[in-house]
Structure formats: C-alpha cells, structure tokens
Image (cartoon, grey):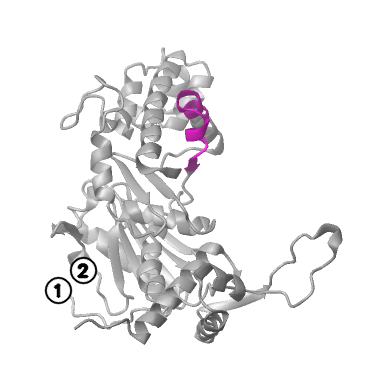
Amino acid sequence: MLSGISKLDLKRINRMQVLRTVWEAGPISRVDLSQKLQITRASITQITNAMIAEGILTEIGEAPYPNHQDKGLPKGRRKILLDINANYKFVLGAVISEQEVCVGLCTMHMDILDKAVMPCTDHTSRKEILQFIVSACERMMANACLDRENVLGLGIGVMPIMIGRMRVFYKDGMLDFSELGRSLNYPQLPPVFCGNAVWLLSLANADVKRMGIQTANEVYIHLGSHIHISVLRPDKTEQDYLTYSYLTERSIIRPGGRQQDGYPAGSVRAQLSVAAMQARIAEVYSRERTPFLYTATDGYIEHVTLEQMYQAAVSGDTRVEEVVQEIMQDWSVLLHNMVCCFQAQRVVLHHFSLSDKGFVQFKSYVKQYAGDDIADRIVCSSVEDRTDFLAGCSLVLMRNFYMNGGIPETRTPAPRNR
C-alpha cells in the first residue's frame, strides 16, 4: 500500500533546504529564504526559530541598506540575517593520497583550527596510515577541549591510487568503504564517513568558496601521477567520478602522440600526467641546453613543475619554451573538451602548484590556443597548501548535517574487528 510522506520526513526536508540555502546564499533573511524556497514566511519563521533555539542557526545582525543614492533610506524594519552557527559543532577530516596523509579540524564554516601531515611513500602501510589518523584526531580534540559529542564526524577521503592499499573494494558496482570505516570505529572518535577524495575535493572547493548557489556544472581536475576528473553538478549528488577519470585519461588529445603502456598513443595520461610532462622536458633537460631550469631544480628532473617551466621559458631557455608550447596546446585541447562535454561553467585546477603569476601564464597559453571563452572559465582550487583534509570535512557536513536537516547521527560505535 502506498503512503504519503510523513511529517518527520517533511520537517527534515524543509530543514535540509533551509540549511543548504543559508550556507550557499550566504547570510540571508527569513523573507529571502521564503522567496527562494517557495515556503510560506510563517513556516520559515517556525523552522528557523527552532534551529536558532538548537544552536544550529544564529542571527548575525541587520542587512545593510541598498544603495538608494539620493532617494533617501527606505522605510520599515530592516531584514535580520541568518547564518550557520560556526561553533555549533566541529568537524574532523582526512585525505589519504600517495604523497601524504593530511588530517585537520575545522568549524562549521570550514575555518581551519588545526592540521597535521604525514609523508606517504610506497612503503607506508595501511596500519601506519590509520594510526596516524587516529592519533592526530585524538590530539586535535584534546587540544581544543572537545569530546565525541562536540564533533559532527570524521570524514575520510581516499585518492583512487590508494584505494587498494586501504582495502576499499567494489561491491555491486560501487566502492565499499565499510572495512575502512570499521577500522576507525573507536569509542573516543565521532561517526566516520568515507568517500572518493576526487569528488570530495570538488565539493570542498565549492563549500570553501561559498560564492552563492551553484547553477551550472563545474569540472574539477586533479593533477598528479594520474589525472582525475570530477563533475560537480548543481544538486551536488553526482558521484560518477571514477568513470570520468578513466575515460578522460584514455581520451586522445594529440593523435599519434606519446606512448604509455595500457593507454592509446597521444592519450591524456601519456601526454599530461606529471611524469609525462617531466618526460617531455627530460628530452632537452641538461646544464648546457636548459641552464635556468637545471639550476632551479638542482639537476633533478623529478622536481620540475609547470611553474618552473614557465619561468625557464621567459628566462631564455628556448628549448623549454618549445616543450611548454606543446604541453599547453595539449592542456588547451583537454580543457576545451571538458567544457564542451560537461557543459561546464567553471574548470577548477587542483594540485597544479601554480603561483598567481604562474596561473596568469597558464591562462594566457589557454587563451592563445583555445580562446577567451575557455580561458575565462578556469580557476584555481581554494583547497590547496596541505588543506586537502577539508574534503573529508565537506563529506561530514553533507551527510551528517545538511542531508539530516541539522539532526546529526550520534550512533554508539559498534565493537571493532581486532
């Protein structure tokens, strides 16, 4: 027998919509909330007052008057703005990548309170990684005088290359993080939530920017030993990131180009991964032919970055300039394809290690080879400089706050498997 939606479910849905709109639209009044959500003012007032009483929302003052120039100030009561209470709860996050394990503590506003980083190598064991996460979380909670009830959750993001090492497997076509979650199920820690770090980094970037409600697709490109692609849609529930990464790396951007085992000639992986770009520079790299770049990297080709290539090109290393132009032609093709395939309003670059000047140079090359329209869509990720753990924090906020209407899960930890 079919049944309608319950009052409890309706209450949770309304609260969920209010919380997400407050966060994405910035501090907002009850009147504007009512208009955006098409919910009566009386209902909005009832919902928001209840969440203020619970400490979830807070009134931050009156809205400023609009600029009326010579018309004088408008009459009537000014709107009272609402915002998420930054200290309602606190959030722990971690990201496990091939280079490092990054752990941190933040507020509900994603303001960083503490962080810790452990370098990771091919020899770093799963046990060492988990021990570091647990000890770092315990230390951060102790330093901030927080207990389990004060923390909304611990979010773990795992980069695809680390999935096997962390014993994350596919089950019914989906990644199964249950074993990893059980391994971190300690009585002193809050509930644990796990996910793919690539998509979570794109979510964290949107949350940190807080630039208004998203209305179009956003492509997120993570540069490393692999090139991972995540597409963040306005509803923020799209999780088909692994398929995009796999297909993107195998797509051809330079027909008849470079070879790499398991990938077509001229594929994205063969042309643009960090190792691939370094291999292209290695063909001209020497003290005599590329003096500036050689000195800047102390003679280690594995230290070469895009930023250093740009600097070498403008400093007289003509052989580097030739390689950079070819590399940037390939990046321009890839970026053009991403915008067209996913109808993306923005393309976010993550882990490209570009300074402000380097980013300007990157965009100038794209403008030259792909045009102004593509170049103007490119931005750098807000989640950089060892703050990747915010990806895990975003997962907790999404699953245990916004999707729950501000009623967090507080389950008692189950016994751990020894």
Question: Callout 2, which amino acid?
Answer: Ser
Is 363 positioned to the left or the right of 173 in the image? Answer: right
- Is there a contact, CB below 8 Å, between mark 1 and mark 2? yes
Which mark is on residue 417?
A: 1
Would residue 2 be counted in the magenta stretch?
no
Asked where in the image residue 403 lies, by quadrant, the reply is: bottom left
In which quadrant is the C terminus drawn?
Answer: bottom left
Q: Is residue 7 above or below residue 356?
A: below
Disc 1, SS: loop
Which span of residues is magenta-colored? 364-379
Q: How would you classify the magenta stretch by its main secondary structure?
A: helix
Is 105 positioned to the left or the right of 120 in the image? Answer: right
Across and down, in percent, residue 340 comes to 38, 37
Q: Nearer the viewer, residue 410 or 341?
A: 341
Is 81 positioned to the left or the right of 346 in the image? Answer: right
Category of crowding for the residue at label 1, using alpha-carbon neighbours closer than 10 angstroms: few (below 14), some (14–19), many (at least 20): few
Q: CA distance from mark 1 to mark 2?
A: 7 Å
Q: Nearer the viewer, residue 102 or 257?
A: 257
Q: Which residue is mark 2?
A: 183
Is 220 positioned to the left or the right of 262 in the image? Answer: right
Which residue is at a point 41% across and 82% down the rendered structure image? 11
The answer to which of marks 1 and 2 sits earlier in the sequence is: 2
Can you see residue 296?
no
Asked where in the image residue 397 lies, by quadrant, the reply is: bottom left
